[in-house]
Amino acid sequence: MKIVPLSDVPHHASHITDWLWQAFGAGTAREFYDSIVRSSLNGAEFPVTFVALDENDTPLGTVGFWRCDLISRQDLWPWVAALYVDPPARGNGLSEALQQHVIDYARARGHEKLWLWSTFGGYYERFGWEYACKAIEFPDIDVNVYSRSLR
C-alpha cells in the first residue's frame, strides 16, 4: 500500500469524487465534490487530496489537507478533511495511516497544529486527537472539533 497525492494519479479523480459525494454529500450536488477534487489537482498549497493505493493501483481510501473544512470556524486551519476508507479496506489501520500522512505532510510544511471535525466522538481520540470544542456545520449540524499538535 502507498499513499500519494491525487495529482500523481489523476485518473482516480472521478472515483474519489464518487466516494466523497456518497459518504458526505447528502443534499449536495456531486459537482460540489468534483470541484473540490479537481481543485486539488492544480498544485496549489490547498487543497491537497491524497489517495491510498494497493499494489494493483486500486484506490483503498482518501484524505484531504484543506484550508477550511468548517465554515463556522474559519479561524482554524489547516484541516484534515474528507477521510474515507473503502469498506473492504477497513479494519487494517488505513484510517490511521491516512491521518498520519497528512500530519507528516503538514508538519513538513511548518504547520504547528491540525484540525478536524466529526459528528461523533470516541474515534479520533484513539489516534491522538484532542477534543477542542463544539461547533456547527452548515446549515445546522452539531459537530465535535478536534486538534492535533504537530510539535
Image (cartoon, grey):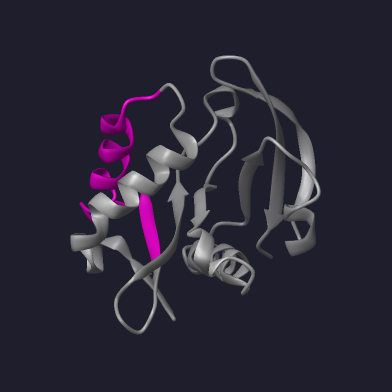
Picture residue at 50% right of the left edge, 54% below the top: 84
Q: Residue furthest bottom?
A: 55
Of residues 76 and 85, the one nearer the viewer is: 85
Residue 29 counted in the magenta span: yes
Image coordinates of residue 116 in percent, x first then y, are 62, 45
Picture residue at 33% right of the left edge, 72% below the top: 58
Instruction: Say left or right for 43 vs 117.
Output: left
Instruction: Say left or right for 67 vs 38.
Output: right
Count of picture labels:
0
Of residues 122 and 18, the one nearer the viewer is: 18
Instruction: Say left or right for 96 vs 62.
Output: right
Q: Give the quarter of the figure containing the N terminus.
A: bottom left
Instruction: Say left or right for 54 vs 145.
Output: left
Q: Give the quarter of the figure containing the C terminus.
A: bottom right
Q: Residue furthest front?
A: 88
Image coordinates of residue 36 in percent, x first then y, are 32, 40
Of residues 61 and 76, the one nearer the viewer is: 61
Picture residue at 46% right of the left edge, 27% below the top: 26
Image coordinates of residue 141 in percent, x first then y, are 64, 21
Which of the 4 image quarters holds residue 93? bottom right
Which of the 4 image quarters holds residue 111? bottom right
Q: What segment is highlighted magenta in the picture?
A: 28-51
In the rendered view, would you say 102 is above or below 44?
below
Residue 49 counted in the magenta span: yes
